[in-house]
Amino acid sequence: MLYIDGISLSKIKEELKKSLEGKRINRIFKNNEYTISIHFGKIELLLSCIPSLPICYITKSKEQPILDIASSIISNLRKHLMNAMLTDIEQLGFDRILVFHFSRINELGEIKKYKIYFECIGKLSNVIFTDEENKVLDTLKKFHISENFDRTLFLGETYARPKFEKKILPVDITEKDFNRFLENKISLSSEIEGVGKFLNNINSFGEFKNILNSDIKTKIYFKDKKIKLATVLDLDFKDYDEVKEFSSYNEMINFYIEYEHTTTSFMLLKNRLESLLEKKLKKLNKTLFLIKKDIEDSKTMDSIKEEGDILASVLYNIKRGMNSIKAYDFYNNKEVEIELDPLISPNENLDRIYKKYNKVKRGLINAIRREKEVKEEITYVESTLLFIENSTDVISLREIEEELVKLHYIKSLHNKKKTKLKKEVKYGVIEGEDYLILYGRNNLENDNLTFKVSAKDDYWFHVKDIPSSHIILKTSKLTDELIVKAAQVSAYYSKANLGEKVTVDYTLRKNVSKPNGAKPGFVIYVSQKSVVVEKVELDKI
């Protein structure tokens, strides 16, 4: 993970100042809906508000924009900031907010000053453009009040810092107060501004001051070839088996982005797809809740019919104008009173009850059908989110995007005449001496693998009850060792957490079928056996 708290940002700010202060803007682009790049000659400053990676840095990537979107903020930035000089970069306290100060001489020879507030605060990250008096001229993101109810950023309003708790600044903290926090087991992040979760583990005031006052220390810690922590702070991190040091924050962050496959295109597309499907999943779960409530409410159906049957048994005693009638409840062996509408006939009263019963019955049948459909769609969305999470490049994400466009989940943002992506391989392959393990990397690949690539006598694996890839095992001799190996591959390409034990079903491929009209990746299977395995890293299988 990339660790950036307020103290980290204060050090990043100083490095950016050395590189950019006194330089003039010659180009401004909106790379995509969440990212702005500002060029100072050959130096490109990237302001990324992608929720999963809100950062600013000098990028070495020559990546082209993936979306061509007209934007009012770019028009305003170009209008006011072209050829403007960056005069200063400041930080609001030790909050994760940087302020870029610019100065420019306009056509009338007047000196005009402007500011860009860069707020790198997760999903609410934003770029806010203001004049010298902090009047908002434009914003990168326009939040609905339901998304950010703490404040509004209407044009012409005075910029206000996001709502925050008043805390002690790191430079103002005394050793006495610091030790009091430690003794009372009070988390440092709750009392000191700019302190993130990793700094809560500090054991002494001296260690804290060293981190605060030391020069930038850019390191990336690895464990099992995966990044555990990327930081600009001199942290005492222990959970690693390899560490790589860098000469600057920009060198470190560019390496991090390349290593984690987190290019702007990748992160933007990944975030877009995840955001869309998470919203869809939330809506589906809400729908499922309401359906289940309807099914629960339909349990009154039997009592409605019973009331009708009881009324039918005494119908001959009822006369128009009666408000109610007492009758023997032969279902529950007791006397009951049934309310009547005095304005209609006895038969009409009886018909009304049976019509109500039939309506509830029809509703129950529809609710049960809808429950099945919604559950299947939830399974599809959850599996697609899994495949997005496991994707490591833009190509694999594009294929998932195409699948979602085809199913009308999203509209394509690309030129309709653009040639569709082509891939040579339509599934993943793990090859052994006497076996092949094939796995799908999205739902269309799952379908292709199961129903077009595999033979009827191949073995099919899937984690029980949770989203996972379809796994095909091709072998002439099925052994216990191969069953466990294929099951572990299935567990690895599932939603399960590392170290978690899961049940994996397996059966012959001929026992797997796809219901008519089912979504990609959805199947039913019979005659399965099961094996319990632990999810481990792929290189340990």
Image (spheres, rainbow, N blue to C red):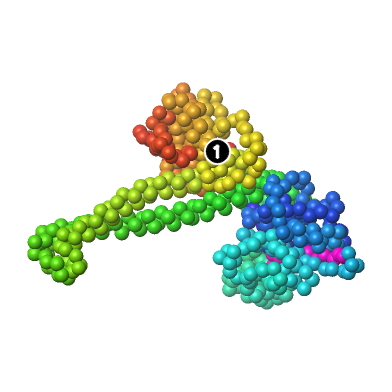
Q: Which image quadrant for residue 318?
A: bottom left
Main SS, magenta region, reads strand
Say if 78 sits above or below 411 in the image: below
Which residue type carries mark 1? Answer: Arg
Q: Nearer the viewer, residue 118 or 5?
A: 118
Instruction: Name the residue at 67% across, 55% down.
Output: 34
Percent x, y for residue 163? 63, 71
Residue that protrudes farthest toward the top in the picture: 476
Q: Is residue 209 visible?
A: no
Q: Is residue 347 visible?
A: yes
Residue, disc 1: 441
Q: Does the stretch in magenta take in 100?
A: yes
Percent x, y for residue 277? 53, 50
Instruction: Name the residue at 67% across, 69% down.
Output: 154
Q: Which residues are magenta?
A: 95-106
Secondary element type, mark 1: loop
Label 1: few (<14), some (14–19) or many (≥20) C-alpha neighbours in 10 Å: many
Q: Nearer the viewer, residue 166 or 484?
A: 166
